[in-house]
Structure formats: structure tokens, C-alpha cells
Amino acid sequence: MSKRKSGCNIHGILLLDKRLGVSSNKALQEVRRLFNANKAGHTGSLDPLATGLLPLCFGEATKVSALMLDDNKRYQVVIQLGVMTDTGDREGTVIETKPVPELSIDDIQACLEKFTGEIDQVPPMYSALKHNGKKLYELAREGKTVERKARRITLFELKLLTDSQALAEQPDQLTLDVFCSKGTYIRSLAEDIGHTLGCGGTVKELRRLEAGQFNIENARTIEQLTEMDQQSLFQCLINVDKPLEALPAVQLSDEQTICIKYGQSLDFLPFDQLSVNGASASPERRQGTVRMYNDAVFLGLGEMLMDGKLAPKKLFNMSNESV
């Protein structure tokens, strides 16, 4: 029996512009095969209906993927008014239709203002949230509906991109720019806006433009990646510690690095060794989670304690092929 060819231990983040009609996991596996990567994961899925920014984490970057789930997101969404589906998007079964009232730009702006800021949102049944250990979408596919608790989310910006001419030509469609906190369901937002306008609504198109500090302008499509040679592919990878830049950084000597790698705490004074983006950390930043480096090598995350000790928290093994 021949041995299975092993993959590569690559470490970094790739920004994918996910195409329409594929799941986030399928998109991840396609890119993973291009890199022949041993370990990979994504940072929050996009529905097959949705396109746009999907950060993919390889190797040790998977250790920061959970932190990236908490990032704010920006979407562009097209809402189909007068139509309601069981899934909240156009891929679902139509369950009700209503005539769309004559709406002005002012009417729509007044509606959007009601949703701007902190609001309570009820998650949709077609979601991955769990009820008694079972995912809601599994229950929904069985024709079951359960009560869901509303969750507090924040819509930082909710802009109408449809102008008067576009509204006159297609009075049943609205295009919005949505900048929101984690946990926001755009499908629920589309439904709620539609109900407030008196006709219901569902998502027709959805595209993610931003996730935390990352932007769609720096993302590549699977077609672009497929045409690249191996060197060009590796140049697309973003450093593992890029999402952690807001955390203070500390530089360790070779001796300190050995101690940290063995799980030992260090006496770490004076505090002026802590920096954020090259500047000394303020007093209030001198406790808590920090990034640890030995020269330019990222070692992982540590914890600055009140007694001036530095304790290892999450170590990263940046060996073999890495970024």
C-alpha cells in the first residue's frame, strides 16, 4: 500500500472572494488543495447565496480564527420587497406575497433610521444556532419552528444605495450598505425592514465587503488563485499575527523565549518594553493579553499579570513553510 502524500505546514491568512453558489466549506477545500495545506479553516461561513470576503486561515492561523469571528462586518444587500420565503432569501420556498406600497426615498430612510444603532434581533430558523443540541436549520427542514430569544446587535451604519430613479424603475427592490456587529443576520434584517414597510421582504443578493480590518479589495477569486504558481500563491498569504495588531507587543530574548516555550512564566519589567504598533503601551494596556516575539518571529500570545510576570497563554509553532 502506497503512503498518502503529506501536505504542507503553511501558516497564514488568505482573503478569498467567494463565488455564488458554493458553500464556505467547499470554497475552503478548493483553496486548501491549491496550497496542499495540512490544516485550514474559515472565519464564519457565508451562505451559498452570498458572495464576497471570506478570510481563510491556514496552519497556526487557525488559532486566531475564533477571534476573527467577533469582528464587525460590512455587507451590500439587495432586498426583494413583497416576497417572503421560509429561509429569508431567494433560495427558499415562497410562503407569502404582498403588494408593495408606493414608497418614497424619505419613507425608506425613516424606516432605516428605526434599525440603526442597537436593536434586538430574533435569529432566523434557518441558522446554525442550536436548540436542545440540534441546529435550528435541521429543525426547520423538518417543518418545525421553535421560539428563539432576541439578541442585541448593533447596526453602526445602514445606508440606502438605491436612488430615486432606481426606485422608480424597480420599486420592489432596495440596495443597502450594512455595517454591523457580530451575530447580525442580514436575512432577518431584510424581513424586518420589509415588514416595517408593510410588504415583507427577502434577500435577493448578498455580498460581504469587509470583515474586521480586511477588505474585499484585497481578496482573490478561486479563478485568480488557480492561475497562480506556487510562489505567487504564498505571496497572497497574510501574516498570522495581522488580526492581533491591536494587542501590545513584547520582545523576548533567546533565553526568555526558551522559558516561554517550556510553559514557564517570566519576570517582565520594566513595562516600557510593551508597545502597540511601535509606540509604548499606555498604563491601562500593561495588563492582559500581549503578542510575544523573538526578533521578527511571532511566538504567540502571553498574559501580563499584575505582579509584572509574563505567562504563556497560547503558543504558535511557526515551523516549516510559513509566513
Image: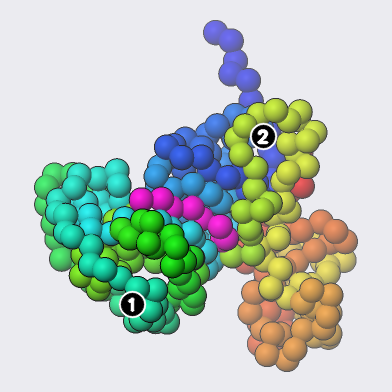
Q: Does the magenta segment cover residue 285?
A: no
Overall secondary structure of the magenta section? strand
Is 49 positioned to the left or the right of 197 in the image?
A: right
> Which of the marked residues, 1 or 2, is nearer the chain's N terminus?
1
Q: x and y percent of residue 34 in the render?
A: 64, 30
Q: Is residue 68 above or below residue 308?
A: above
Q: Does the magenta segment cover residue 210?
A: yes
Look at the numbered disc 2 and give the secondary structure of its residue: helix
Residues packed near mark 2 inside 10 Å, few (<14), some (14 to 19) or many (20 plus)? few
For residue 195, which numbered disc appears in the image?
Answer: none
Nearer-the-camera pick, 100 or 238: 100
Q: x and y percent of residue 98 in the render?
A: 16, 59
Q: Is residue 279 above or below residue 255?
A: below
From which residue to which does the magenta span run?
204-211
Inspect the image, locate mark 2, and give the three-letter code of the amino acid beneath it: Gln
Q: Name the residue under label 1.
A: 107
Inspect the image, locate mark 1, and give the three-letter code of the amino acid beneath it: Asp
Quarter the N terminus occupies: top right
In space, the residues marked 1 and 2 are separated at their CA atoms by: 42 Å
Q: x and y percent of residue 279 in the render?
A: 83, 80
Q: Is residue 78 above or below residue 253?
A: above
x 62%, y 32%: residue? 223
- Residue 152 seen in this snapshot: no
x 71%, y 85%: residue? 286
Q: x and y percent of residue 67 in the render?
A: 55, 63
Q: Mark 2 points at which residue?
A: 224
Residue reaching furthest to the top: 1
Look at the numbered disc 1 and give the secondary structure of its residue: helix
Is 123 positioned to the left or the right of 247 in the image?
A: left
x 43%, y 60%: residue? 166
